Image (spheres, helix red, strand yellow):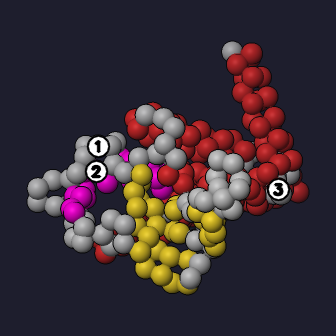
Amino acid sequence: MTDYLSNKNTRHSIFSIGWQVALIAILIVAVDQIVKFYVKTHFYMGEAYEIFPWFQIKFIENNGMAFGMELFNKFILTFGRIAAVIFFIWFIKKSLDVAGLRKGFFVACAMITAGAAGNIFDCVFYGEIFNNPFPPQHAVLFPSGGGYAGWFEGRVVDMLYFPFFSFTWPSWIPGIGGKEYEFFQYIFNIADASICVGVALLIIFFSSDCSKAFNAVFDKQKAEKSDN
């Protein structure tokens, strides 16, 4: 009887954590997309709204990775994100069977997965469902003339801008003298922030859980392959 209750409680705990992880991921993606839809349809390209001197909502788009970086081909980025999301979902599911992992580890994994998924929606769908008018016009959802690009060719919407401070480098410094420097100059979105926070949590607080989960999951996979 005791073993039955123990197994039942374990299954219930795993079930609960799994659903909590799914709920967190869905919530992050939903908030990310709601904010993007609002900015896309209420701001023109380059428009900024100051909330505080150090925080603005500024609408830009990019073809690349987090914080506007462009390192790879558009299709490689999109399908790379899709592959990453599929891997993380698989990894989280397998990790639920590993004993001793803290809930925060799963929350961090959910944040990374949700962040990657949030930007996938932009890349896959936005080119088809939005137009791209000249400023000061705002984009229209499901425009009569069609979207601005094809499937998988949409641009990622960014809007969170934190210009904390800026200064001009002294003229005597070689290479950068006389140039203006701004911290923090990157513009990003909720999905980007979710990925960064999730990765930071894994590194700072849950690195041991991450190692334990990886070792357990992949050792199990190797064992299953060798048995076959």
Q: Start and end of the magenta stretch?
A: 117-134
Q: Is residue 70 above or below residue 25?
A: above
Mark toward the start of the polypeptide (2 vs 3): 2
Question: In the image as oriented, which residue stretches furthest toward the front?
Answer: 172
Q: Which residue is mark 2?
A: 127
Residue 48's label in the rendered image is none
Residue 4 included in the magenta stretch of the image = no
Return the residue nearer the eye: 76 or 132: 132
Q: Are marks 2 and 1 in contact (CB under 8 Å)?
A: yes
Question: Which picture quadrant has residue 171?
Answer: bottom right
Which of the 4 quarters of the picture holds residue 151?
Answer: top left
Q: Residue at x 83, y 48 (%)?
A: 207
Comes first in the chain, label 1 or label 3:
1
The CA span between labels 2 and 3 is 37 Å
Q: Which residue is mark 3?
A: 204
Residue in front for this viewpoint, 188 or 134 = 134
> Residue 42's quadrant in the figure?
bottom left
Mark 1 = which residue?
151
Q: Is 44 on the left-hand or right-hand side of 69?
A: left
Expressed as whole percent of the image width and height from the top left, the position of residue 196 reads 65, 56
Callout 3 secondary element: helix
Left or right: 121, with 167 as reference point: left
Residues packed near mark 2 inside 10 Å, few (<14), some (14 to 19) or many (20 plus): many
Amino acid type at circle 2 is Gly
Q: Secondary structure at mark 2?
A: helix
| Earlier sequence position, callout 2 versus callout 1 | 2
The structure residue drawn at horizontal position 40% and vertical position 38%, both measured from the top left corner, is 74
In three-dimensional space, the C-alpha distance between marks 1 and 3, rounded to whole angstroms, equals 38 Å
Estimate the spatial distance between the alpha carbons at disc 2 and disc 1, rounded to whole Å.
6 Å
Circle 1 SS class: loop
Say which amino acid is labelled 3: Ile
